[in-house]
Image: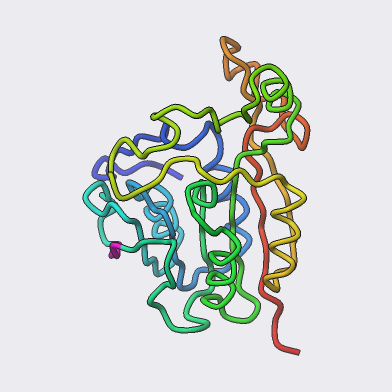
Amino acid sequence: MKKNRKDPVFDLERAYADCHRIALRLADAERPGRALDLGAGQGALSHALRLRGHDVMAADVNTSQFKASGVPCAKLDLNRPLPFPDGDFDLVMAVEVLEHLESPRAFLREIYRLLRPGGLAVVTTPNITSFPSRILFLASGCFDLFVPTRRRLEDPLDAEADGHITPLPGWLLRYDLRESGFEIEKTRYTMAYVPFVPRAVLRFFRGRFLGRVSLYAVRRPPLA
């Protein structure tokens, strides 16, 4: 897709490597409809979904950073119930959000409520059981992306937002998704992360045991 000169410029380094690209690829299987981008940040995903023909609504606790033109962005605390009607969306994106929340399981139930029957959600979280994360845990007692520093525990852009406070192993997230009512359709992983190794090399290393971020495409079952 060609980039329009008037398109906003987003800081894509705020998401890990190829996370946005894979999330959009998972969402591309859906026909254009009403989409909700939760934890939208600057709005890079919102913008991409709008270009794909979706009617997009965004939400973030820090709306001052949002710059996707033509997309409304509501200021919302994602730890609380969301002010949208049941079954209001065909697609919900929650990319690099779960690890920032006090109760991811309650949040997943909210996403399920907001989706129409047959609707799709894409959710992600750091892959804390990857081999690099396990090695870091053995060495330091901390998972990858959950090192207890101010940079990780607090959002540098907004005092109202938490940093990475909730590590979720894949087995637990899959359990929570199913308990919330979802059917898991696809699981994908971003490229690996190893300090001082260039991404041109790391892009060949991904999957359950190497990928840094896990992505799930999950569906609310259609009505019988």
Q: Is residue 128 above or below residue 34?
A: above
Query: Which quadrant would the C terminus be assigned to in this image?
Result: bottom right
Residue 166 in picture, x, y percent from top left: 56, 46
Q: Is residue 142 above or below residue 171?
A: above
Q: Nearer the viewer, residue 21 or 141?
A: 141
Tell which residue pokes out farthest to the top in this image: 196
Residue 186 lies in what quarter of the image? bottom right
Residue 17 in picture, x, y percent from top left: 53, 31
Principal secondary structure, stretch drawn in magenta: strand
Q: Residue at x 35, y 48 (%)?
A: 161
Q: Is residue 97 above or below residue 120?
A: above
Q: Residue at x 64, y 32 (%)?
A: 212
Indicate left or right for 44 with 130 as reference.
Answer: left
**Magenta segment: does it hold 72?**
yes
Which residues are drawn in magenta? 71-75
Indicate left or right for 42 with 13 as reference.
Answer: left
Indicate left or right for 195 with 66 as reference.
Answer: right
